[in-house]
Amino acid sequence: MLHKLAEDISFYLITNKIIDIEDRDIYIYGLELLISTLLTSISILILGFFIGEFISAIVYLLVYFLLKSYTGGYHAKHYYECYIYSILFYIILVIIKNVTLAVYQPIFGLLSLIFSVIIIFKFAPVENKNNPKTKEEIIKNKKIARRRILILSIATILGYIVKVELIDLWFMIAITEFSIAYSILKQRFLERRENNEKHKDKSIREHC
């Protein structure tokens, strides 16, 4: 359904000579990503509003928009899987925020920030096979990802110190960063396992 909608929109753009037909596949992919992102964001905001966690929803989305497009991370095979994955992660983070006692939030928050900075500095960006990057783009994304995670983490630590009454906000930022770092590690693990399986299959065929 999402792919069909993106195709229809791209066909409209081509018909009205807004884009070239040669670039249609690129625009279809971009439109699919845009529609999926909008649908996911609106769903999380609505969910956050109804469960009384609207601010947490805004924080979750802002951190993701600031970092994820430059760090990369786990890529589901289908858009509906990505949709479900994003919403489930938001719910899990809200639960973690609400069950963690305020006295422990600064400790766990700081550990989450440190973990996130280390993982992003070491492994980001993770490439998306459906949207390959040039070497220059990868270097650029790496610099932006590192700069943003540092600024965001430092701002969060300062927030803990200066505005301790907003501790839930700072903790939500910290664990959202952690979720992005986890997503990076998960994708790296899946890629490594896939490569190992390919090498294993290749070895078997060579010995047959």
Image: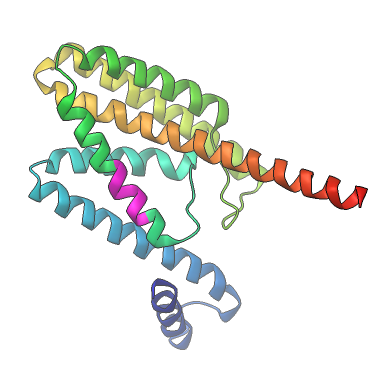
Image-quadrant location for residue 69? top left
Q: Quadrant of residue 24?
A: bottom right
For the rendered model, the colour scheme is rainbow
**Most foreground residue, 18 or 68:** 68
Answer with left or right where residue 142 lies relative to residue 98: right
Q: Which residue lies furthest to the front in this view?
A: 208
| Residue at far bottom of view | 15
Q: In the rendered image of this protein, does residue 135 appear above or below residue 160?
A: below
Number of residue marks: 0
Residue toward you, 136 or 69: 69
The percent position of residue 12, horizontal first and vertical second, equals 41, 84
Q: In this view, does 158 lie above or below 183?
A: above
Tell me the residue at 23%/14% (across/down).
106
| Rendered view: 31 above or below 175 | below
Picture residue at 34% right of the left edge, 22% below the top:
153
- Residue 201 colored in magenta in the image: no
Q: Main secondary structure of the magenta part?
A: helix
Instruction: Please state if 53 lies on the left or on the right of 25 as rendered.
Output: left
Query: Which residue, as the protein is rendered here, is positioned at the far right?
Result: 207
Q: Position of residue 93 (x, y in %)?
A: 26, 35
Percent x, y for residue 174?
30, 26
188 on left or right of 5: right
Image coordinates of residue 57 in percent, x first then y, are: 20, 43
Look at the image and give the residue range highlighted in magenta: 83-89
Task: State the quadrant of the N terminus.
Answer: bottom left
